[in-house]
Image (cartoon, rainbow, N blue to C red):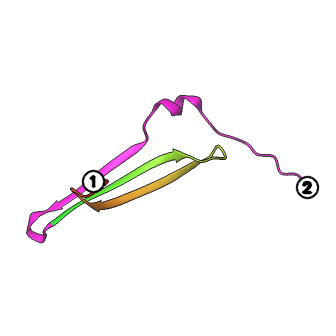
Amino acid sequence: MDRQMVSAHDPAMDAKADIMLLYRIDPSRNMARFYRLSIQPTLFGGSSLVRNWGRIGTEGG
């Protein structure tokens, strides 16, 4: 049985940057963190959620 792929790709979404940046800062605990969530296209026409996190001031933060 062959499976048919259905793509929900919307070309209008290509122009937008789907990124969310969150910061958590608490000087009393020496805490300065960042969290970045982004939606990126996959090689097969789908979407993938990519997570990055770390200390503010480090590479990527």
Taking the image as shown, residue 4 lies to the left or right of residue 17, namely right
Q: Which residues are magenta?
A: 1-30
Q: Which residue bears the numbered disc 1?
A: 61
User: In this rendering, would 5 be left or right of 2?
Assistant: left
Assign a secondary structure to mark 2: loop
Residue 22 shown in magenta = yes
Q: Residue at x 59, y 48 (%)?
A: 42
The numbered mark at residue 1 is 2
**Who is closer to the viewer here, 10 or 58?**
58
**Quarter of the figure that contains the N terminus:** bottom right
Left or right for 20, reference 48:
left
Q: Which mark is residue 16?
A: none
Marked residue nearer the N-terminal end (1 or 2): 2
Query: Mark 1 falls on what kind of element?
Result: loop
Q: Amino acid at mark 2?
A: Met
Percent of width and height locating residue 39:
48, 47
Outermost residue, bottom direction?
A: 29
Q: In the rendered image of this protein, does residue 40 appear above or below residue 35?
A: above
Q: Is residue 34 above or below residue 40?
A: below
Which residue occupies 43% across, 41% down?
18
At x 54%, y 51%, the residue is 48
Where residue 33 sits, quadrant-wise, is bottom left
* Rendering coords of residue 46 (x, y %): 62, 46
Residue 2 shown left or right of residue 16 in the figure:
right
Whole-Å distance between the Cαs marked 1 and 2? 48 Å
Identify the residue at image location x=54%, y=28%.
12
Q: Give the residue type at disc 1.
A: Gly
User: Alpha-carbon neighbours of circle 1 within 10 Å: few (<14), some, or many (≥20)?
Assistant: some
Image mark count: 2
